[in-house]
Image (spheres, grey):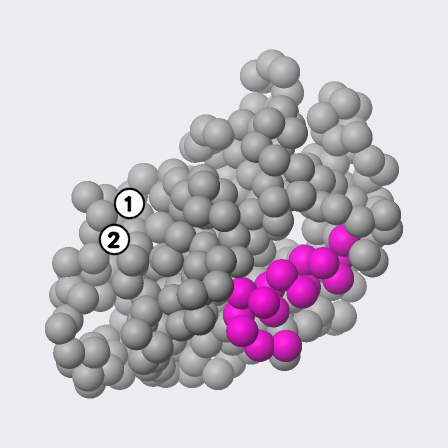
Amino acid sequence: MPTDFNQLTNQLPGLVELCRTYATEGRVASYIPELAHANPQTLGITLHHKSGSFTSAGESDTPFTLQSISKVFTLLLALMDRGEQAVFEKVGMEPTGDVFNSMLKLELVQPGKPFNPLINAGAIVISSLIGGDTPELKSQRILRFIRDLAGDDSPSFNESVYRSEAATANRNRSLAYFLKDNKVLDQDVEPTLEVYFKQCAIEVTCAHVARMGLILANDGSDPLSGREIVPKRYVRIAKSFMVTCGMYNASGEFAIQVGIPAKSGVAGGILALVPGELGIGIIGPALNDKGNSTAGVQLLKQLSEHYDWSMF
């Protein structure tokens, strides 16, 4: 971190414009039709420092849905609801090396449970572990948790994106029914998928994601109020998964080039954090073939190189 946060604030707009050119190397996700409306040239970022200072550049006010970023927070909530033993009886702790919606290893590797909670199969199982008697209650608990971490009541479900996901989710339904048949998923498929699709469709801005990242960077406590929101142990589990699995099957490359915990989503969002220092929220809808924002990843790479953020 620069000793003067103003240094970072002054340099950030130029870095955003430098990295915006990388958007031409990616494409907006279209397999969820509602996401295809995003402007591929959009690039925005907010950084929130533990001192309370924050800075933004680019189109940081552009709303976007969490998509797979939500998996970090449903994992935390499931751990808080069920505990480690119950959660990791159902999902593993290892990266897969496969694409995020692959079902290959569910059949090839026994006992057929998902390798980790950040791939789609694992996140579907995690959604089933959230406390609540109905899908609506589970979804509302997830939304309240997101709002609490973001320090703002404005994040809400984007109904158009939710309906678009639900209408086109043949692969996710296949994963869920396979998990049900394997007795890894204990609850009914359609109610579980309702929770999963709704968590992915929570709409936020970069400022929300940066604030959420700041809580994770501070091991689950809000550095501005001192309030513990998530137990430190569970946050450390989540950050470990972000390093090993958070950028899909490009996580190893990202760890080498950037070296900080991060989680991407196919709407183009990235949640990242510098441990003990700051949270980062990025939007850049143009994606590479791994499902990560092309300009967003480049922006994090430039920032990490400039300010020596790498944990390694």
Expressed as whole percent of the image width and height from the top left, the position of residue 173 reads: 76, 41
Expressed as whole percent of the image width and height from the top left, the position of residue 124 reads: 68, 42
At 75% from the left and 31% from the top, the residue drawn is 185
What amino acid does circle 1 point to?
Ala
Residue 101, placed above or below residue 275: above
Mark pair 2, 1: CA separation = 5 Å
Expressed as whole percent of the image width and height from the top left, the position of residue 90 reads: 64, 28
Badge 2 local density, few (<14 within 10 Å), some, or many (20+)?
A: many
User: What residue range appears in magenta?
Assistant: 138-153
Residue 259, placed above or below residue 85: below
At 48% from the left and 83% from the top, the residue drawn is 61
At 15% from the left and 58% from the top, the residue drawn is 308
Q: Is residue 275 among the parts visible in the rendering?
A: yes
Query: The residue tagged with tag 1: helix, strand or loop?
Result: helix
Badge 1 local density, few (<14 within 10 Å), some, or many (20+)?
A: many
Magenta span contains residue 140? yes
Q: Quadrant of the rendered structure where residue 7 is? A: bottom left
Q: Residue furthest top?
A: 110
At 45% from the left and 41% from the top, the residue drawn is 233
What amino acid does circle 2 point to?
Val
Q: Quadrant of the rendered structure where residue 64 is? A: bottom right
Q: Is residue 173 left or right of residue 113?
A: right
Query: The residue tagged with tag 2: helix, strand or loop?
Result: loop
Magenta span contains residue 4? no
Q: Are marks 2 and 1 in contact (CB under 8 Å)?
A: yes
Q: Quadrant of the rendered structure where residue 24 is? A: bottom left
Residue denoted by label 2 = 258
